[in-house]
Image (cartoon, rainbow, N blue to C red):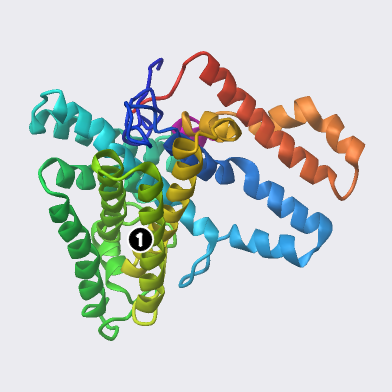
Amino acid sequence: MKSNLSNAGFSEMTAKSKPISANGGGPQRLYSLDALRGFDMFWIMGAEEIVNTMAKATGSDFWNGFANQLTHPAWNGFHMYDLIFPLFLFIAGVATPYSVGRELEKGKTKRQVMMRVIKRAFILVLLGLVVNNGLVIRPVSDIRFGSVLGRIGLAYMFANIIYIYTKKQSTQIIWFCGLIIGYYLVMKFTSAPGFPMGDLTQPGNFASYIDRTLMPGKLYLGNHDPEGLFSTIPAIGTGLLGIITGNYLKNGKADGKTKAMRMAIAGVILFALAWVWNLDFPVNKNLWTSSFVLNVGGISLVLLSIFYYIIDVLGYKKWAFFFKVIGMNSILIYMSGHFIQWEYTTNGFFHWVGQIFGDPYNAVALAICFVGIKWAFLYFMYKKNVFLRV
């Protein structure tokens, strides 16, 4: 498990690589990718619990509103918590030109690189099964096959295959548009049997119907799985948007400041288009609708432009080290909760902290300690140069 990882696919996205110079000089580490990935993972490794406990302790409108943003809407709509998953996939795409592209530049054949990508996807699908079902033998009917890691693996794989076999970035843009427009047309002109054409309700939409028909085992919501097979199609677009962005960062001739500005402008445009499209095709994470792709893609571009400009262009890196440590072992911390009793460890070391604070802030203090314990573990792994690699 010990390796020097690069700004690459899913868990190989931790950089010992030499991507680009933000200011046009020699090659240097694209530090912002690790930091942004770590910022993304920070929210699901315990930061959301800090916000939730603050909301309960204070009862303030601000913290309650913040806590509400760290939940998923029941169906249509968007909360910031919906960004975590697609932002991760977008970042994986941004890293592709530096990893897969570098392998091609070194002389590996397209087939060799593609087989490595397929292997990664297969491993991620298997890890997703472990996350969902544990290491327990179950009847197929009791197994949930759809998973976050599985979707990342499949979307990453297909987006990378498109990248490997397309020479021009314009072709990748055509693929991106084709995926989200094609998905829109299918969803608008089909439905589950017995429902009107274009029905986008949970029981009536075509994607959920296909998943109910084709996917073995059980679906997360019974008649629908948010990580189903059919809605993986537009998720490929999310990964491909990241690849297009990574291509621009790696090969664009502009200086770093200009690249950051253009990414931010592109992000705002995509965000605006998403909410115009929302009028006809609602923003919906459960279905990964085309408007959702544009919405999260736009926000991801803006976030990356900010991190890239501050860290790689201006050179302010020290503040981002906290997130970098998380980002360099993202798959490890994501899966760790299924094998490590973090609550037990936190209480063992810091129960006294909660006693000092007392009600109602004892829960807040322990939530902070919970995140701190995880970060300390990741820092130890970072110092030992140990990273979980797929």
- Mark count: 1
Residue placed furthest toward the bottom: 196
Amino acid type at image mark 1: Ala
Q: Position of residue 295 (x, y in %)?
A: 40, 64
Q: Is the magenta stretch mostly helix, strand or loop?
A: helix
**In the foreground, 163 or 201:** 163
Magenta segment:
330-338
Element assignment for label 1: helix
Q: Can residue 171 be seen in this view?
A: yes
Residue at (25%, 58%) from the top-left corner? 233
Q: Can residue 288 be seen in this view?
A: no
Q: What is the quadrant of the N terminus in the image?
A: top left
Give residue 60's quadrant in the image: bottom right
**In the foreground, 42 or 301:** 301
Residue at (39%, 82%) from the top-left corner? 279
Q: Position of residue 342 (x, y in %)?
A: 64, 32
Question: On the picture, is 38 further left or further right than 360?
Answer: left
**In the foreground, 313 or 67:** 313
- Whether 275 is drawn above or below 220: the answer is below
Please check the rendered image and state whether residue 19 is part of the magenta-colored stretch, yes or no: no
**In the foreground, 292 or 252:** 252
Q: What is the quadrant of the C terminus in the image?
A: top left
- Whether 187 is drawn above or below 337: the answer is below
Residue at (13%, 54%) from the top-left corner? 171
**Which residue in the structure is indicated by mark 1?**
266
Residue at (34%, 67%) from the top-left corner? 289
Please check the rendered image and state whether residue 334 is part of the magenta-colored stretch, yes or no: yes
Q: Tag 1: Cα neighbours inside 10 Å, few (<14), some, or many (≥20)?
A: some
Question: On the picture, is 330 further left or further right than 250?
Answer: right
Q: Position of residue 112 (x, y in %)?
A: 12, 28
Q: Where is residue 321 in the image (x, y as percent from the top left)?
A: 56, 30
